Amino acid sequence: MGWLAYAILASLLFGTYNIFATKANVAHGENVTMLFESAVWIIPIATILIAARSDFQKVTLASATYATLMGVAEASGFYLMLVALRKEPGKMTTITLVIALYWIATLAYSEIIMRVKPGWIPEAIPATPKQWVAVGLVLAGVILFNLR
């Protein structure tokens, strides 16, 4: 399977996430929901520990730090999303739409990093003016979507 198939499958799975999260939060709150979600991670962790043992030889202090910071950002972001869903379960679609804009933050962070530390993300390519126009159109779409 190519990257696009994986990305589409991930999108379809993430599309169900907030539906189940909202139902769970209404029943027992975001703390318990986060605990259950974290417990499920044991399955992929066990699989990875078995299947990717040779990759652990490549770990450096820097790579471990980046991976840990990624985990902190992910867990914190998911927890904040659960809090938002508990506070306004009727706004599940709006909350999901706003959170799905994280890619704009990634784009902005990458642009800043490329200017401050050129070469730190060697794969990064600066956004073109057309791409920034697209970002503006997406943000306009979010605003229009939420007008009642």
Image: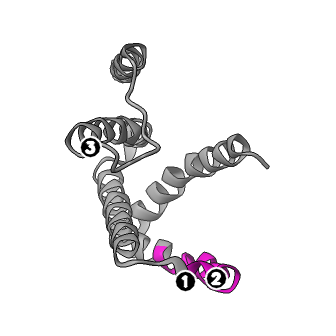
Residue range highlighted in magenta: 38-56
Q: Are marks 1 and 2 in contact (CB under 8 Å)?
A: yes
Q: Going from the N terminus, do you reach mark 3 or mark 2 first?
A: 2
- Determine whether the residue tagged by mark 2 lies in a helix, strand or loop: helix
Looking at the picture, how far across and down is residue 30, in whole percent? Answer: 35, 66
Answer whether residue 95 is visible to the viewer in this image: no
Which residue appears at 73% of the width and 44% of the height? 5
Residue sticking out furthest to the front = 119
Identity of the amino acid at label 2? Answer: Ser
> Which residue shows up at 43% across the image and 70% down it?
33
Q: Residue at x 47, y 64 (%)?
A: 24
Real-space Cα separation, disc 3 to disc 2, in angstroms? 31 Å
Name the residue type under label 3: Ile
Q: Which residue is at 36% across, 19% downward?
A: 132
- Indicate left or right for 126 with 8 as reference: left
Q: Position of residue 141 (x, y in %)?
A: 40, 18
Q: What is the spatial separation of the Cα atoms under label 3 and label 1, in whole angstroms? A: 28 Å
Q: Magenta span: helix, strand or loop, mainly?
A: helix
**Residue at the outermost left position:** 116
User: In this rendering, is residue 33 above or below 88?
Assistant: below
Q: Is residue 52 left or right of residue 100?
A: right
Secondary structure of the residue carrying tag 3 is helix
Q: Position of residue 64 (x, y in %)?
A: 39, 75
Question: In the picture, residue 50 is in which quadrant?
Answer: bottom right
Between 89 and 142, the one nearer to me in the picture = 142
Q: Which mark is residue 57?
A: 1
The foreground one among 13 and 28 is 13
The residue to which callout 2 is attached is 54
The answer to the question of whether label 3 and label 2 lie on touching residues, with beta carbons closer than 8 A, is no
Name the amino acid, label 1.
Gln
Q: CA distance from mark 1 to mark 2?
A: 6 Å
Instruction: Return the mark for residue 113.
Output: 3
